[in-house]
C-alpha cells in the first residue's frame, strides 16, 4: 500500500512515465510556463518518453504553427494543438517506431494570473494517446480554473494537474472514477477546479461523459456541470459568458406540464425586462446534487434519464452542488454581469425564507438575501391553488412552518401568489422589502389547468399503472418515458386473442 502512495506523488508519476519505455510523445504548452515539461525533465529519464517540447508564446509564432484562432485560451485552440502535434508525431516517427510505441501528445493553453493580477486563471488541457501501438488514439480534455493568488503558484498547480492528467490517461482508463479523483492528487480542490471533462476514443466507447461530469460534482472537483439538449457536455463559462440567465430548479422526476409552463411564462416576462431586452440570454433547467442523492446513493440511470428527458424537449441542463439559491446566483455572477432570473414555485420560495439554511452565515438570512439580490436578480414565482397550498402546509415539510394560509369559504378557487403569501411575522418586513424593490415577481399567464399537477403524484400514477399520468406531462415526455420504460413504467400486458 505504501508503494502505491509513493507512486501517486507528482514526481513519481512523471518518473514512472519516463521509465515506462513504451510511450513517446510531445508536450506543447502555451500561457503559464512549461511546467509539465519541466517536471518530466526535472525527475530524470525524460529522453525515454519525450520526443519534443514546445511553447509558442508569441501570437505570430502560434498562428504560424497552429493557425489563427479567435480566442487563444479555448477548446478550439487546444484541439488545433493536439491535431497538429499528433500528426507531426506520426509523420516523423511512425515508420521508425510505430509498431512498438504508444504515441501521445499533451497540450495546454492557459491564462494564468497576469502581472497586474486583474484576471482569473483558467485553461484547457488535453492528452491524446494510444492505448496500444498501431491503435486509433483516445483523447481526454478538461477545463480548469486556477484559484491561487500568485502567478508562480498557478504555474505550479498547472504542472501538477498536467502530470496527473497524463498519468491517469495511461493508467486509469478502466476506472473513470479513479481517473477523475486522481486529477487533484497532491494539490486538492482549494487550488484547482475541474469544471468540464470529455473522454473520446475506442478505449472509452462505453463511457458516458455526462456521468463523468456528474462525478466531478460528486467528488468536489467542481460545483456545477452543464449539458446541451443533445447530451453534449458544455463548458459553463463559454455558455454563460456575458449572457442574461434564467434558471428553474426542480427534481424533474418526471418533467410535468407545470415545469414547462413555469419556465415558458417566466421566459416571456424575463425577455421584457429592460435589462434583458436585446441581450443574449440562456435558459436552464437545474437539478441539485441533494436532489439526485435524495435516496442516499447516486442512481446513475435515474440521473441520465432526467437529463435525457429534459434534453428530449429541448432544454439545457445544469447539475449543481448549490443547495442555497444565493450560492447558485453567485456562481452565475462568475461569468456574467447581466440580469439573472430564477423561476420557482411557492414551496421553493418558502424554502428561501427558512432561516435554518443560513446558520453558517454570520449575518444569517439577511446576509444571504444581500448576496442573492445584490445586483439585477429577480425571482419569478409560479402560483399555487390554495387547496394545494394547504395540503403542502399540512405535509409537515420544514418550510411549511414559516407560513400560514388565510381561511376563505372558496379556498379551492383562491390563488396563492408572491403578492398574497403570508410568511412568519419576524420575516414579514424583509419579504415586503423584496416585493417593493421588485426582487420578487408573480408569474402571470400560466395555464390554470396545470396547477393541480405535482410530480410526486405523476410518479405514483406511473408506478401504479394509472394512465392518467400521460395527461399530466408533455406528450414528448410521455412518449420518452414509455419508450425507455423509465420511472417504474411497465406497459400493460396485451389481452390474449380469442
Image (tube, rainbow, N blue to C red):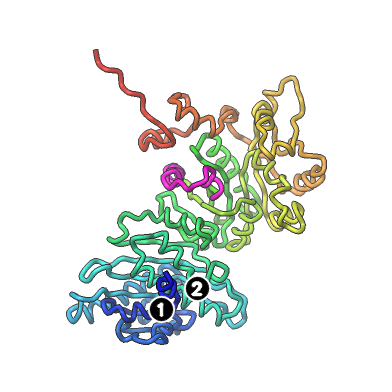
- Image quarter in which the C terminus is found: top left
Instruction: Name the side, left or right, on which 281 lies relative to 487.
Output: right
Pinpoint residue 296: horizontal percent, then vertical percent.
52, 45
Query: How far apart in space, not on screen, are marks 1 and 2 (Cα)?
Result: 11 Å
In this view, the residue in front, 470 or 80, is 470
Pinpoint residue 3: horizontal percent, then vertical percent.
40, 73
Image quadrant in which you'd find residue 419: top right
Residue that badge 2 annotates: 186
User: On screen, 368 above or below 74?
Assistant: above
Residue occupying image coordinates x 59% and y 79%: 150
How dense is the environment of label 2, judged by Cα within 10 Å: few (below 14), some, or many (20 and up)? some
Q: Main secondary structure of the magenta part?
A: helix
Residue occupying image coordinates x 66% and y 52%: 274
Q: Helix or strand or loop: what does disc 1 sit on?
A: helix
> What is the residue that sits farthest to the front in this orientation?
1
Residue 274, labelled with which disc?
A: none
How dense is the environment of label 1, judged by Cα within 10 Å: few (below 14), some, or many (20 and up)? some
Residue that badge 1 annotates: 12
Which circle's residue, 1 or 2, is located before the other in the chain?
1
Q: Helix or strand or loop: what does disc 2 sit on?
A: loop
Residue occupying image coordinates x 39% and y 70%: 126
In this view, the residue in front, 390 or 86, is 390
Q: Are marks 1 and 2 in contact (CB under 8 Å)?
A: no
Residue 60 seen from this side: no
Instruction: Name the side, left or right, on which 396 lies relative to 84.
Output: right
- Image quarter in which the N terminus is found: bottom left
The magenta span reads 289-314
Amino acid at each position: 500500500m505504501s508503494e502505491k502512495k509513493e507512486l501517486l506523488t507528482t514526481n513519481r508519476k512523471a518518473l514512472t512515465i519516463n521509465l515506462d519505455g513504451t510511450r513517446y510523445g510531445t508536450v506543447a504548452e502555451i500561457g503559464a510556463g512549461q511546467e509539465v515539461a519541466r517536471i518530466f525533465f526535472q525527475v530524470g529519464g525524460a529522453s525515454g518518453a519525450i520526443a519534443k517540447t514546445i511553447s509558442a508564446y508569441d501570437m505570430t509564432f502560434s498562428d504560424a504553427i497552429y493557425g489563427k484562432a479567435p480566442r487563444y485560451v479555448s477548446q478550439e485552440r487546444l484541439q488545433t494543438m493536439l491535431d497538429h502535434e499528433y500528426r507531426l508525431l506520426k509523420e516523423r516517427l511512425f515508420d521508425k517506431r510505430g509498431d512498438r510505441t504508444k504515441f501521445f501528445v499533451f497540450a495546454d493553453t492557459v491564462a494564468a494570473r497576469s502581472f497586474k493580477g486583474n484576471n482569473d486563471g483558467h485553461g484547457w488541457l488535453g492528452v491524446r494517446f494510444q492505448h496500444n501501438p498501431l491503435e486509433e488514439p483516445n483523447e481526454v480534455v478538461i477545463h480548469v480554473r486556477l484559484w491561487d493568488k500568485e502567478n508562480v503558484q498557478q504555474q505550479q498547480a498547472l504542472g501538477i494537474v498536467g502530470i496527473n492528467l497524463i498519468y491517469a490517461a495511461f493508467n486509469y482508463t478502466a476506472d473513470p472514477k479513479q481517473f477523475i479523483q486522481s486529477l487533484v492528487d497532491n494539490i486538492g480542490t482549494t487550488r484547482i477546479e475541474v469544471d468540464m471533462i470529455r473522454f473520446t476514443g475506442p478505449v472509452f466507447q462505453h463511457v458516458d461523459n455526462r456521468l463523468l461530469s456528474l462525478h466531478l460534482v460528486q467528488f468536489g472537483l467542481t460545483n456545477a456541470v452543464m449539458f446541451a439538449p443533445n447530451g453534449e457536455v458544455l463548458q459553463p463559462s463559454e455558455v454563460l459568458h456575458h449572457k442574461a440567465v434564467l434558471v428553474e430548479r426542480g427534481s424533474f422526476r418526471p418533467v410535468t406540464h407545470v415545469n414547462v409552463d413555469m419556465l415558458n411564462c417566466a421566459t416571456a416576462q424575463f425577455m421584457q425586462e429592460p435589462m434583458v431586452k436585446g441581450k443574449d440570454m440562456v435558459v436552464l433547467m437545474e437539478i441539485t446534487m441533494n436532489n439526485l442523492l435524495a435516496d442516499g446513493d447516486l442512481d446513475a440511470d435515474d440521473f441520465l434519464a432526467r437529463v435525457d428527458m429534459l434534453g428530449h424537449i429541448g432544454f439545457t441542463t445544469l447539475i449543481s452542488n448549490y443547495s442555497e439559491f444565493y450560492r447558485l446566483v453567485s456562481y452565475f455572477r462568475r461569468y456574467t454581469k447581466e440580469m439573472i432570473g430564477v423561476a420557482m414555485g411557492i414551496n421553493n420560495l418558502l424554502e428561501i425564507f427558512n432561516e435554518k439554511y443560513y446558520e453558517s452565515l454570520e449575518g444569517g438570512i439577511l446576509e444571504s438575501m444581500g448576496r442573492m439580490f445584490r445586483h439585477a436578480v429577480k425571482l419569478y414565482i409560479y402560483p399555487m391553488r390554495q387547496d394545494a397550498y394547504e395540503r403542502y402546509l399540512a405535509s409537515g415539510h420544514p418550510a411549511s412552518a414559516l407560513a400560514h394560509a388565510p381561511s376563505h369559504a372558496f379556498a379551492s378557487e383562491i390563488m396563492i401568489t408572491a403578492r398574497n403569501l403570508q410568511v412568519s411575522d419576524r420575516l414579514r418586513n424583509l419579504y415586503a422589502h423584496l416585493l417593493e424593490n421588485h426582487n420578487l415577481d408573480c408569474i402571470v399567464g400560466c395555464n390554470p389547468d396545470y396547477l393541480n399537477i405535482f410530480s410526486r403524484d405523476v410518479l405514483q400514477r406511473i408506478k401504479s399503472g394509472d394512465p392518467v399520468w400521460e395527461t399530466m406531462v408533455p406528450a414528448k415526455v410521455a412518449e420518452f418515458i414509455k419508450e425507455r420504460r423509465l420511472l417504474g413504467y411497465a406497459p400493460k400486458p396485451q389481452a390474449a386473442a380469442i
